[in-house]
Amino acid sequence: MAASNRTTPHPSTFILLGIPGLEAAHGWISITFCSAYILSLLGNCLLLAVIKTEPSLHEPMYLFLSMLALADLVVSSTALPKILSIFWFKDGAIGMDACLAQMYLLHSLTTMESGFILAMAFDRYIAICNPLRHSAILTHRAVAKIGLGVVLRGAVLLAPHPFLLKWLPYCETNVISHTYCEFMALVKLACADTTVTRAYSLVVAFLTGALDLVLIVLSYVMIFRAVFSLPSKETRFKSLSTCGSHLCVMLVFYTPAFFSHRFGHVAPYVHILVANIYLLLPPVMNPVIYGVRTPGIRQRVRHALGVTPS
């Protein structure tokens, strides 16, 4: 596989390098990545099957969780097969249109994941701060509308990204120092003014992930105020315990997202590894978090696996 130093302004193919600086470890890294991919497929498919077949889980929180699981499945399947082909077969070539499609799917779906986590925070806020109206506010129809709104937001706001990138000239190189087609990695290859492209990307990031995180934090501020105003310590603990799984999911998603941006003089391979963890960790951990902490899910999984409780 050879890549030229200069290429045409509109190349038909890009070359993904994987993790530059860690080429010798690609084989070992692939074991972890492949294991994570298999676990994410099994965990999220099992989670979706359990939520579908267990009537007691047809509640807003778990309906939003099923939407999150679907997004996790698509994110994993969009990124991992190509990453593994780079590690195993040194096949980094990817067509221009395929690269832009992968970039769009990954960025739009991670935006949707953020929206579903915000929807779950809204569910916890209503359940704790206004429990008597929870079922009246979050009906199945309302849940469907919120889910559709999250999907449309991600799909529409990220739709200009592929077109903005396709119009840019790439006259220096077609080599992408990354494991997947990431927006900023492609922008850096362009030999043209990318001010508008970068500005639009920043606006979208603010209107999605950043705004979602602010709203989630505000919802938990109000949740904690409501919980700590309760007279009984046992009631406070019980109320907070219902938020434990969601808080874990939020930390698993937003922590690597925060560190996936470069701060200071960080080696490029560290940035790329964290960016991959951002894609890999949530799909693996979300089913585990809810499977361990939710009795209904835990019991159904044990039944499906033929394991009897001790």
Image (tube, rainbow, N blue to C red):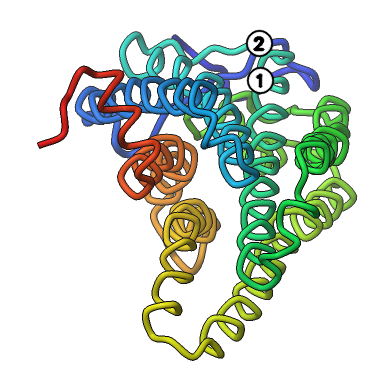
Q: Residue at x 65, y 64 (%)?
A: 213
Question: Are there few (<14), some (14-19), or many (20+) residues within 10 Å of tag 2?
Answer: few
**Nearest to the observer: residue 247 or residue 238:** 238
Q: Residue at x 46, y 71 (%)?
A: 240
Residue contact between numbered discs 1 and 2, judged by CB atoms under 8 Å:
yes
Q: Position of residue 123 (x, y in %)?
A: 66, 56
Q: Position of residue 206 (x, y in %)?
A: 77, 60
Q: Amino acid at mark 1?
A: Cys
Q: Amino acid at mark 2?
A: Gly
Q: Quadrant of residue 104?
A: top right
Disc marking residue 156: none
Q: CA distance from mark 1 to mark 2?
A: 6 Å
Report which residue position mark 1 lands on. 99
Image quadrant occupied by the N terminus = top left
Q: Position of residue 221 (x, y in %)?
A: 62, 80
Height in image: 56 above or below 196?
Answer: above
Report which residue position mark 2 lands on. 95
